Structures are given as structure tokens and as C-alpha cells.
Image (spheres, grey):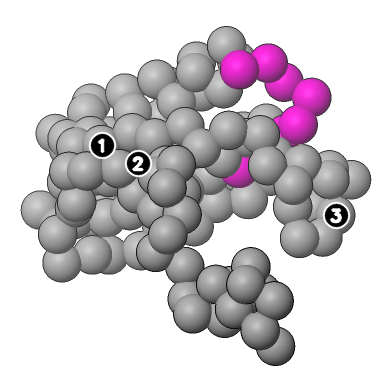
Amino acid sequence: MALYESVFIARQDISAQDVEKLTEKFGKVVTDLKGKVVKTEYWGLKNLAYLVKKNRKGHYVMFGLDASPEAMAELQRQFQLSDDVIRNMTTTVANIDKGPSLMMKSDRSDRPAAASKRKSGDE
């Protein structure tokens, strides 16, 4: 089994409860194929950089998975079959961080120095 991080973006016009149901459904796909969902994060409704299938916003969800390639192939298939998923991306990782991801941290002091320059007025 390998470690993966998978992010999907759901349509803006579905409710947070529907996103939770989708998350459970996709997690079940992995666990049914002997995989394990190590981490799940709901990042919220965020603006997209550009229109995607006529959506300006999307619900972002991230999984940390320990699964076989077959389970990941089935998860990708389920993402593509779902009308509610507008984009998804899966990558292999060396390890899955148990703590909150950068998207979940409320203290954004870990931004690059350029961001702190803008705050102080030095440009």
C-alpha cells in the first residue's frame, strides 16, 4: 500500500451536508477496497482562480489515504462519475502529516517574506 493525498472540489450550489455525504461515500470506496482514510479535512467554500464548469466557488475536501493502486483507480473513477465533483487531484506522498494542513491553520505567519513586506509597507 502507498500513501496518497487527494483533493476534490465540489460544486458551489450543493450544501455542506451534501459535501459531507460525498466525503463519506468516497471514503467508503477506499475502505471497501482494503484502504484506510488516515485524514480528512474540509477546507470550506473557496473562490476558484477561474470558472470551472460555470462555477466561481467550490467546496474543497482533502483526504490523506493509505491505499492500493486499485483502490485509488476506483476512487478516481468515482470522482469522474460524480456530477457534483468539478475537479480532483491525487498525488503520492512520503508521509501523511497528522496535524492540520496549511489550509486549515488559522495563523498564517508561515507565509513567505514577500507577504510580510506588504503588511509593513516596504516594497
User: Which amino acid type is shown beneath numbered disc 3?
Assistant: Leu
CA–CA distance between discs 1 and 3?
29 Å
Picture coordinates of residue 97 (x, y %)?
Answer: 19, 51
**Identity of the residue drawn at 63% across and 68% down:** 119
> Please, what secondary structure does the residue beneath circle 2 have?
strand
The reply to whether discs 1 and 3 touch (Cβ–Cβ < 8 Å) is no
Pick the front one: 29 or 14:
14
Q: Residue at 66% across / 34% down in the picture?
A: 45
| Number of the label disc, if any, that sits on residue 51 | 3
Find residue 40 and report its image quarter. top left
Residue 119 is at least partly visible in this image: yes
Q: Is residue 48 above or below residue 25?
A: below
- Residue that label 1 marks: 39
Give me the C-alpha separation between circle 1 and circle 2. 6 Å
Could you say which is closer to the camera, residue 101 or residue 63?
A: 101
Q: Say few, some or many: other residues with alpha carbon within 10 Å of mark 1 (under 14 / 14 to 19 / 20 or more).
A: some
Location of residue 50 in the rendering, given as x and y in whole percent from the top left corner: 82, 60
Which mark is drawn over residue 63?
2
Q: Quadrant of the C terminus?
A: bottom right
Amino acid at circle 2: Phe
Does 49 sit above or below residue 76? below
Which span of residues is magenta-colored? 9-16
Among all residues in the image, which is located at the extreme top?
A: 17
Q: What's the amino acid at mark 1?
A: Lys
Whether residue 12 appears in magenta in the rendering, the answer is yes
